[in-house]
Image: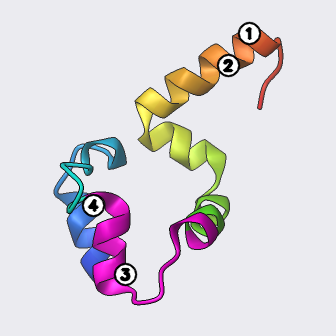
């Protein structure tokens, strides 16, 4: 299961490039491998396990968005 998902990930420049459409979105790919996957629950747990620093390093658009929010709020997330 993990190997299959990692193989999918390796086909793209970054996780942000994986979402090609409604049937190939990351959550749809995960559901094909992991029956019972619930995006709100499991997605949050996976994100917490990966960690914000790693997500920011791998996802530049997400990092830029968070950086703008941090500048607005005057703090670091």
The mark nearer the N terminus, 2 or 3, is 3
Q: Quarter-wise, where is residue 40 in the image?
A: bottom right
Q: Quadrant of the N terminus?
A: bottom left
Tell me which corner region of the image, top left, top right, bottom left or bottom right, holds residue 35. bottom left
First in sequence: mark 3 vs mark 1: 3
Q: Secondary structure at mark 3?
A: helix
Going from N to C along the chain, the mark reached first, 3 or 4, is: 3
Q: For mark 4, give the secondary structure.
A: helix
Looking at the image, is mark 2 or mark 3 nearer the viewer? 2
Magenta residues span 25-42
Q: CA distance from mark 4 to mark 1?
A: 32 Å
Give the residue displayed 71% in from the left and 10% down from the top: 71
Q: Which residue is mark 4?
A: 9
The residue at the point 35 percent across, 74 percent down is: 30
Residue tagged 1: 72
Q: Would you identify the image quadrant in which residue 69 lies?
A: top right
* Residue 2 in the image, given as x and y percentages of width and height: 37, 81
Q: Give yes or no for contact between labels 2 and 1 (Cβ–Cβ under 8 Å).
A: yes
Which numbered mark, 2 or 4, is in the foreground of this view? 2
Distance, label 2 to label 3, CA atoms, is 33 Å
Which residue position holds label 3? Answer: 2
User: How many neighbours does mark 2 have within 10 angstroms: few (below 14), some (14-19), or many (20 or more)?
Assistant: some
The answer to whether residue 44 is above or below residue 63 is: below
The Cα atoms of the two marked residues, 3 and 1, are separated by: 38 Å
């Amino acid at each position: 299961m993990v190997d299959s998902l990692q193989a999918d990930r390796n086909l793209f420049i970054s996780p942000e490039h994986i979402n090609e459409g409604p049937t190939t979105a990351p959550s749809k790919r995960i559901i094909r491998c992991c029956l019972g996957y619930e995006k709100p629950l499991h997605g949050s747990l996976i994100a917490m396990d990966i960690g914000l620093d790693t997500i920011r390093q791998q996802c530049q658009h997400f990092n830029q968005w968070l950086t703008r929010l941090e500048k607005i709020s005057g703090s670091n997330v």
